[in-house]
Amino acid sequence: MRLKSKDILGLEEMGADEIELILQTATSFKDILNRPIKKVPTLRGRSIVTLFYEASTRTRTSFETAAKIMSADTSSIAAATSSVVKGESLKDTVLTLQSMRPDVFIIRHSASGAPHFIAKLVPSSVINAGDGMHEHPSQGLLDMMTILENKGKLSGLTVAIVGDILHSRVARSDMWGLAKMGAKVRFVGPKTLIPPEAAKLPVEVYTNLEEGIKGADVVNVLRIQLERMKKGLFPSLREYSQLYGITNERLKAAKDDVIVLHPGPMNRGIEILPEVADSSCSMVTTQVTNGVAVRMALLYLLMGGSEDVTAS
Ligand code: CP
């Protein structure tokens, strides 16, 4: 089985069979990360351009690491140090880079839909590494891989996504992916941080934190995205933390074996307390490791890989 599209733009448009294929492939690749020599020749001669119009630590490094492990060549463009600062448009930037014949573009942009625009413009594959408040599909996939590793299944689980859901592309990718895989998804947060269209989405909405995480198998805590807030959506960070900050005490409402996810970067002491972030139920660093495996799988599947790269 192969992926149906040349691009990875979002999990809303992806089938459950494709998600399963990506997760299985990523799981088989994870072993490579534990080898002393983390290098396989699978994508030798292939080239990848990362094009980031917004800041990133995890996603960009993770895609670059994944590409290097698979022996692909990478070029990294950050908008702040490119001809974008001289006024070059997204279209002209991409057409310039396309002239160098990359196999895959990986793009992060503040405008929802920017990767979709590029995908129509170029014959190369395009991976959405986060577009505005829309989707962040590779994060959704690595979150699902982390849950699957810990719980052995996705179907039937209750996943509470807590915090700034309004501005979160992670919440949207998690929601579409998890719902397709049969999990029950809850959006939990103050009314001002819940998307107005939530009633039409495959989620249950809770404004009370204790009720929202009650009986949950997974609590996925989201960062408060102050940079995307044009107006005050809650009185103060202190008040937000008092009402919605995830503490060990509050986690007692969830299942005994609950795991806690956070896509990062964390605002410690605001949406998540250090006592939770550094506890054994926190999967934050595992998510980062799984991110490399998921991105290896995406690159491999997009570039038509079929050989068994896990054989040493
Ligand atoms: N989770 C995530 O997208 O992190 P970065 O912004 O550091 O890439």
Image: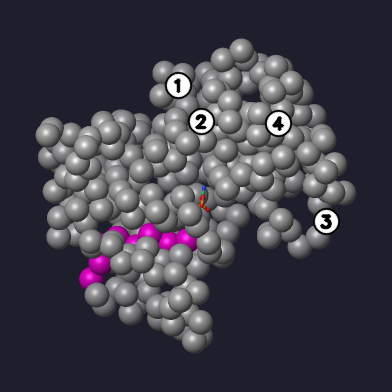
How many numbered circles are shown?
A: 4
Going from N to C along the chain, the mark reached first, 1 or 4, is 1
Q: SS for tag 2?
A: loop
Percent across and percent down for residue 17 are 35, 33
Going from N to C along the chain, the mark reached first, 1 or 3, is 1
Q: Where does label 2 land, which residue?
A: 283
Using residue 181 as the reference point, say whether residue 133 is left or right of it: right
Q: For mark 1, does the 10 Å Cα neighbourhood hold few (<14), some (14 to 19), or many (20 or more) residues?
A: some
Which residue is more in the foreground, 1 or 59?
Answer: 59
Residues shaded magenta: 101-108
Residue at (41% x, 24% y) in the render: 149
Percent across and percent down for residue 13 are 44, 46
Going from N to C along the chain, the mark reached first, 2 or 1, is 1
Residue at (47% x, 80% y) in the render: 84
Q: Distance between the residues labelled 4 and 2?
A: 14 Å
Q: For mark 4, does the 10 Å Cα neighbourhood hold few (<14), some (14 to 19), or many (20 or more) residues?
A: many
Q: How far apart are marks 2 and 1 (CA)?
A: 9 Å
Do labels 2 and 1 touch, CB within 8 Å?
yes
- Cβ(mark 3) to ligand 1 < 8 Å? no
